Image: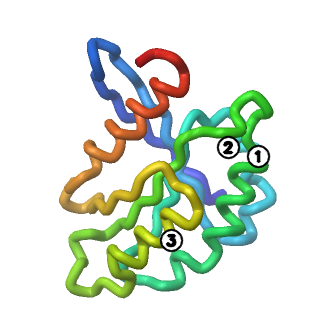
Amino acid sequence: MGVDIAVKTLTIDSFKITLQIWILGTELSFKFIFPAFTRGAAGGIFMYDITKYSSLRNIEDWLGAFKESLSDDKKEIPILMVGGKLDLSKKRMISRRSAKKISKKYKFFKYFECSSKTGKNVDKMFEFLTRTIMKFEGYA
């Protein structure tokens, strides 16, 4: 169906936090079910592939659909832009500079690059997002 769910546990400032991460496919055919999976979100990550221009093709549509689907009481939540596959930086097609420009244009809270394969910056990204969510929710 284009959806995977992962769980990540963090300890931040003596709070034990369990993140439920919904990984949604970006096939346009899944766009109609998108709101059902994003309605209660406290934060978001827009991830693209640094080796493929096409992974940024529909950023405006997906970001708009995500924001439209948020609950009325949570219309403003932290959303990160993340360049994935940092381990393939020799095959990079989208420069860090260009990505940061796009991140700024669409008002993402922060820009990260990471590698799921090596783990580089993955914990850093989730910790930043979690701390930001905690601030939004009044816990920090």
Give the SS element for disc 1. helix
Given contact means CB atoms under 8 Å apart, are the residues at marks 2 and 3 in contact? no
Residue 103 image offset from top left, x and y in percent: 49, 64
Which residue lies at the image location 75% right of the left edge and 62% below the top edge? 31
- Rendering quarter of residue 41: top right
**Mark in front: 2 vs 3:** 3
Q: Where does label 2 land, which residue?
A: 38
Given contact means CB atoms under 8 Å apart, are the residues at marks 1 and 2 in contact? yes
Where the N terminus falls, by quadrant? bottom right
Question: Which mark sits nearer the N-terminus, 2 or 3?
Answer: 2
Amino acid type shown at disc 3: Ile
| Measured Cα–Cα span from mark 1 to mark 2 | 6 Å
Question: Which mark sits nearer the N-terminus, 1 or 2?
Answer: 2
Q: Answer above or below: position of 139 versus 87.
A: above
Q: Where does label 1 land, which residue?
A: 69
Q: Answer above or below: position of 88 versus 8.
A: below
Q: Where does label 3 land, which residue?
A: 102
